[in-house]
Image (cartoon, grey):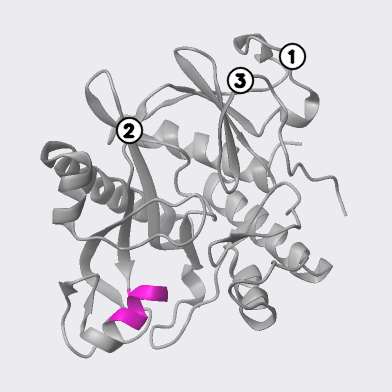
């Protein structure tokens, strides 16, 4: 198995997330995408080779394209050519997986845009006829495209389960003006990205975004539109009425659901699950960007 980076060890670490580690550089942050993978709200002990590079490079590709739609925090992907932008030495294991960004004040909620009826949204619809309290037309099937994308915020948990919240609860957490900006910008990003991806043979069924405040403006932060935060489907295989093949971490979710119980220590992933997940990440990177992932 190729080398993986499960832990980053740089100066001034400000935060350790499920996958990304954040370092404080004063007026900027350095976000290192490790090869850790989480599923069902737990972090697995096995890394996914090249995953951190896919997350960083694909986020940068999207940030560059959506900056005219929604402002964001992206500055640069750190490589050997621009390593001088970081005030301490980086080893080569950090090149291509580390992103320099503006230092925004994070708004503590996750913003989910759903364009199709899938995952927890499909389960919710079957029980209630709605998704996160938003009524939907009767008679929809699993994986059907919704009449229009919907916005469903949740709490953000670095450990344990995220919890869906109402828009009113979001207003209480972040403020009325900020909540409205988060909703409008989430749907703007989703609708733009859905059109871009569809031209490249990929359906974005849903995606999870994060926002912060920088210079008194709500901007897009963290990562964006990657297999970690989005449900990607191959457009040429789309058949509503059932679950869809995907370009994300579904092999990990499926294996974990069959081999692990909540409350137990998560077990190591088998080599075939790791290989299948790496292949999906690399495949969707190439489909979206039109390029192989840089070495």
| 196 over 236 or under it: above or below | above
Classify mark 2: helix, strand or loop: strand
Classify mark 3: helix, strand or loop: loop
* Residue 135 shown left or right of residue 155 in the figure: left
CA–CA distance in space, label 1 to label 2: 28 Å
Q: Quadrant of residue 221?
A: top left
| 120 over 49 or under it: above or below | below
Report the disc number at residue 212.
2
Quickly name the residue at label 3: 12
Circle 3 Cα neighbour tier, 10 Å, few/some/many (<14 / 14–19 / ≥20): few
Asked if residue 121 lies in the magenta stretch, the reply is yes
Range shown magenta: 117-124
Q: Is residue 276 or residue 11 the one in the foreground? A: 11
Q: Is mark 3 in CB contact (under 8 Å) with mark 2?
A: no
Q: Quadrant of residue 283?
A: bottom right
Residue 52 x, y percent position in the rendering: 66, 43
Asked if residue 19 lies in the magenta stretch, the reply is no
| 157 over 259 or under it: above or below | above
Residue 59 x, y percent position in the rendering: 50, 39
Residue 33 x, y percent position in the rendering: 62, 39
């Amino acid at each position: 198995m190729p080398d993986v980076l499960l832990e980053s060890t740089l100066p001034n670490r400000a935060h350790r997330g499920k996958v990304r580690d954040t370092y404080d550089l004063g007026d900027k942050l350095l976000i290192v995408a490790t090869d850790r993978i989480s599923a069902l709200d737990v972090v697995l002990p096995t890394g996914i080779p090249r995953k951190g590079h896919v997350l960083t490079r694909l986020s940068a590709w999207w940030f560059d394209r959506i900056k005219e739609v929604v402002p964001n925090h992206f500055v640069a992907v750190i490589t050997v050519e621009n390593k001088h932008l970081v005030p301490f030495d980086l080893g080569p294991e950090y090149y291509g997986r580390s992103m320099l960004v503006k230092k925004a004040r994070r708004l503590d909620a996750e913003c989910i845009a759903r364009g199709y009826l899938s995952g927890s949204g499909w389960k919710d619809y079957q029980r209630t006829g709605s998704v996160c309290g938003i009524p939907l037309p009767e008679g929809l099937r699993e994986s059907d495209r919704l009449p229009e994308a919907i916005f469903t915020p949740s709490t953000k948990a670095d450990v344990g389960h995220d919890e869906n919240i109402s828009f009113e609860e979001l207003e209480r957490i972040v403020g009325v003006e900020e909540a409205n900006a988060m909703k409008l910008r989430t749907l703007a990003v989703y609708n733009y990205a859905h059109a871009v991806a569809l031209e490249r043979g990929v359906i974005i069924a849903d995606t999870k975004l994060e926002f912060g405040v920088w210079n008194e403006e709500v901007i897009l932060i963290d990562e964006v539109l990657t297999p970690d935060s989005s449900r990607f489907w191959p457009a040429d295989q789309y058949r509503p009425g059932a679950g869809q093949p995907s370009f994300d971490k579904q092999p990990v979710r499926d294996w974990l659901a069959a081999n692990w119980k909540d409350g137990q220590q998560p077990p190591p992933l088998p080599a075939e699950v790791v290989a299948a997940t790496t292949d999906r990440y690399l495949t969707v990177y190439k489909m979206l960007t039109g390029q192989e992932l840089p070495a």
